[in-house]
Structure formats: structure tokens, C-alpha cells
Amino acid sequence: MATPGVGRSPDHEAWWRSAVVYQIYPRSFADSDGDGVGDLTGIVEHLDHIQELGIDVIWLSPVYRSPQRDNGYDVSDYQAVDPLFGTLEDLDRLLAAVHLRGMRLIMDLVVNHTSDQHPWFLASRGSRDVATSGWYFWRDARPGTVPGEPGSEPNNWGSSFAGSAWTWAPERGQYYLHLFSASQPDLNWDNPETREAVFTMMDWWLDRGVDGFRMDVINFISKDPRLPDGPLTRDGYGDGMPYFSHGPRIHAYLAEMKSRVFDPRPGSYLTVGEMPGVTPEQAREFTDRDRGQLAMVFQYEHVSLDADGDKWTQRRMSVNDLRDTLSRWQTALGDTGWNSLYWNNHDQPRVVSRYGNDATYWRESATALATVLHLHRGTPYVYQGEEIGMTNAEFAGIDDYRDIESLDYYARAVGTHREDVSVVLDTLRRRSRDNARTPMQWSAAPGAGFTTGSPWIGVNANHSWLNVASQRGVPGSIYEYYRALIALRHRLPAVVDGHFAAVETGRDQIYAFRRHLGDTALTVYANLSDQPVSLDRKDRLARDLVLANYPASRRDPDRLEPWEVRVYVR
Ligand code: TEU
């Protein structure tokens, strides 16, 4: 059992405001036993890499027992480690090793839904006279319809992956709700027993020494009790988001969680709520320093700028849109709330391929985007592989894909809508979540140093040159640039607490902003385009440069090269 100490902080001190978080997707990080799937021992063996980067906290995506229908975001036992990843003892060893290095570890809390193989659901599905009968959303078929037949679902909501959000359970004679796949039934948080079971499970992990939680779609836990039909969408189903994202009891349930689980404990914990659809105003309320229920939230606006309506419909991201949305979130949360800062995670395509230019300006665009993100006000997240500039997978065919969301999309687009296969595959190459899930590229060896076996998903062929071994300790590499960027946050209070102000340069390609704290001002100029751009006289700062991604020999004071970034402090 992990000992309190390292990781514990004075009561309720917001230590996470100056922290940098590293997200690990265990399936794809490091495989220690050659079965082609990453595991906990593989993580322990690579903690040097993370510590050397300057990371303060590790976010571990789910490792709980799970049928792995959605790669662990379908939990069948919250207090057991899936044998795929190892054992509870392995997790304790990882936790102890992380704390020994002065770092912290947060778990992924997936409690909007369980797996349909969780004993709670298996019992609930089987009978209405069991303790967990009311722990899920069971409803009769729509009156006047044939139960189980399309159109007899209790309402018209579509699931986030594909099809209806309801599935008929003949043994119970009712439908159950699942906002994601049918193997992920939603928990009914309106039932106090359900909430208490979740809080008890959280206590169990905190007693084990974990330092907080990333909370999966936590703004979906309160539904409008009427469960009304939603406005029709392109795929013929109703959009239920207005009735379950930011539901009527969301603040009450998160406040109850805070007072029941966290407040009674010494020290403070990192709690970050993943909240699709959350607005700046709502985020400010959730993260309000005095009244809030969470340390921070994950919002989606800046990672939806190249989607037109739904995630599969593409449009070009504009720097103006990016500037506007990032500035708005900085200003809206201001001194009251707190932002999380991320480009990548296990659900998003790789940013260097998506917003950057991974062909002509790979290193420059990766480092420019990193600098813009990390020097905003908030807590930055680095997703595994981002620190070496890993790119999208460029998979050739549908057999290369593993992600339930991508396979559902392909089946619908090609099967139902008869779309051109090459067009759909092209869309997947740019949008699929599997782009983020290819194995970590440790070396140029076969299996990329990730595994000696056959990987559960294809290794990106560019691991032959794009890997940790070819960047660690190499001046000018993306890895060494991330180290410098993270070190700047640890040494300069203005990066942590400086007030944000956008800087107008009159250039569409340039994103410039200032952070000021007391008499320290940090100014960032970034050209987020493939073309060089001239600088106005007022922006031609000649001194106090503390970080740049172009060598001095290639820096022209009057202009910024493609994807060039400069950071000044005075
Ligand atoms: O993601 C929530 C979510 O909204 C995603 O489905 C997102 O919209 C989509 O992936 C974008 O392509 C969380 C987890 O991060 C995700 O991995 C899970 O699949 C999902 O919840 C269900 O647990």
C-alpha cells in the first residue's frame, strides 16, 4: 500500500496549477512481455523518459478489468487490473515508483457508464428485483410499438458511436440507455446508491495513494429526467446532448462527490472533468477557485476547428479561429477558473499532422504548436509521443483500424450510405482516433522498441527515423525542445500565474500573446503557417529572447519564418 508523503500537499493547495501532465494510453506505451499490448511493467521501465521530460503528473488511461470493447472505457471491475496490463501489485509498484521520483499519478474515472459485463449491469439486466435494478436507465418500449422493433425505443437519441442510444433487453423486457456503444450502459446517477457505490470505489483508489482522477464524460452524468426526444440530426437520430450534457443535477452531484470523497481528506487532488460541449461560462463555474467542484475541465472547441458539424466532415482550421477560441477561454476563466491545455489525447488525431505540417515543417510546426499551448494560462497535457512529434498513422485499409468509433463510422458510411471506400478511408486517415493509438516509437527497431511481439495495432513506418532514441540528448530535437518548454514553466512564475492578453500583430498567420505578472512580461510570437511573414516595427523585439525554435543563424528580426516561434521575457 502506497505511503502518504510524496504527492501529498498542504490542504487544498492548488499544486496542479504549476504542473505538467503526461497522458499514457497503456495499450500503446510499452509492452514488457511481448504479447503485443502495452502493460504496467512497460511503463515502470520507461519512467526515466517521463521524469527527464520534467513531467509532474502521469494520467493513466483505464487499466481496469474490461472486455476492451472501447479499449477499457468499458469497465467490468473498477477495483481490479485487467490481466492484459498486469496485476494490482504491478499498479502499486508503478505508483510507488512514480512517487519515489517526486511525480504523481491520476487514474481515469469512467463512471458515466460501466461495461455491460459489469456484475452491477448483469444483475440489473436479469431482474427488476435486484439491488442494482435502478442503477441504470431502464425504460419500456414506446407505447403502441412492438418492443425490440426499430422505432419502439423510448426516445430518438442516437448513440455517440452509431445507431440508437437504446438497446432492448428481452430478459428484462425493457430498453437500457447507452450514450456510447451498447456495451457501455449508462449509470443512473439520480439513484443515491449508485453514487455511493462510485464514491466508495474512488475512496478505495485514493486510499491506495493515487493523486486524483481524470473523469470521463463527467458532464453527461445528469440527464433530463423526462428523457425527451432530441432535434433530428443527419443520421436520422435525435441529438440528446441538450438533455444530458450539463443536466439539471450536474453541480449537485459533483459537489456531493467533492464533499463526500475529497474534502474529508488531507492534501489536495487533481480532478479534471472531460466535458464535451461545455461552454467557457460553465467551465468557469465548475473550476471556480472558491466555489468550484473540479480543478479543471477538458473542453473541445479548439480541437473541433477543422470539423464542420460532425467530426467526419472536414474544413481547414484558420489561425484566426484558433486565436479567437483560445483567447476567449483564457479571458473567460480569467483569475476565477482554471484551464486545461491540450492538443492531443487518445481520441484526437495527432496535432502536428492535423493543424501543423508533418511533411515540410515537421519539427518547426510541432514545436510552434507546443509553445503556443504550453505558455497559455492553465495546466498543459502532453500525450505520449507528442514529445517526439509522432504523426498520424496513414493506415492503408480498414483492416488496419481497431477503434470501435472508426469501425462503426466505416460500416455506416460504406455499408448504409454507400459512400466511396477510398473517400471514407481518406477521412479515417485524417480523423480516426487510431491515429493517436499507434505504438509509442522508442527506437528504429522492428516493433519500434514497443514490443518484441506483434503489436495489437500497426506501428507507424516512420519509426525508422522518428523515435525517442534519435531525439533524447540531441540538441534541436523536438524532445529536447519540450524539455526546455516545460523547464520554462517550472522556473518562471509568470508562465503559471501571469495574466493573459492577446497581442494584435495585424497578421492573420501570427498568433501572439502576452502573459504578465508583477513587472515580468512574457511575450510569444508564433507564425502558424507555411509562409514567412513580416513583423511590424513594434513587434521586432531584439532582446530578452528566452526560447526559439529556429537557430540564431536563421532568425531574421524583421520577419518570422514558416512555423517560427519566439518567446521574450522582460
Ligand atoms: O470520450 C468522450 C467523447 O466525447 C469522445 O467520444 C469523443 O467525442 C470522440 O472520441 C471524438 O472522436 C471519452 C473517452 O475519452 C473515449 O475514449 C471513450 O470512447 C468515451 O468517452 C466513452 O467512454
Image (tube, helix red, strand yellow):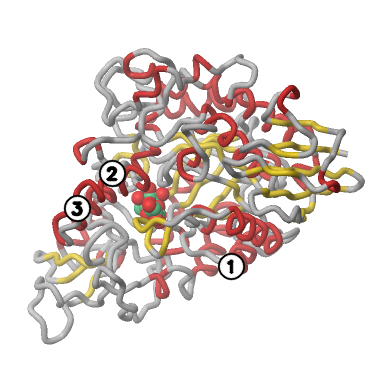
Q: Quadrant of the C terminus?
A: top right
Q: Residue 87's quadrant in the figure?
A: top left
Label 3 or label 2, whichever lies nearer to me, is 3
On whether ligand 1 comes within 8 Å of the CB at mark 1, the answer is no
Task: Name the residue rendered at 34%, 72% in the picture.
Answer: 239
Other-residue count near label 3 (Cα within 10 Å), few / some / many at <14 / 14–19 / ≥20 = few
Q: Is residue 437 left or right of residue 167?
A: right
| Residue type indicated by callout 1 | Gln
The type of residue carrying mark 2 is Asp
Residue drawn where x is 72% and y is 49% of the image:
512
According to the picture, the residue beneath numbered tag 3 turns out to be 420
Q: First in sequence: mark 1 or mark 3? A: 1
Q: Residue 491 shows which numbered tag?
A: none
**In the rendered picture of this protein, how many numbered marks are placed on residues?**
3
Residue labelled 2 has its Cβ within 8 Å of some atom of ligand 1:
no
Residue at which label 1 appears? 282
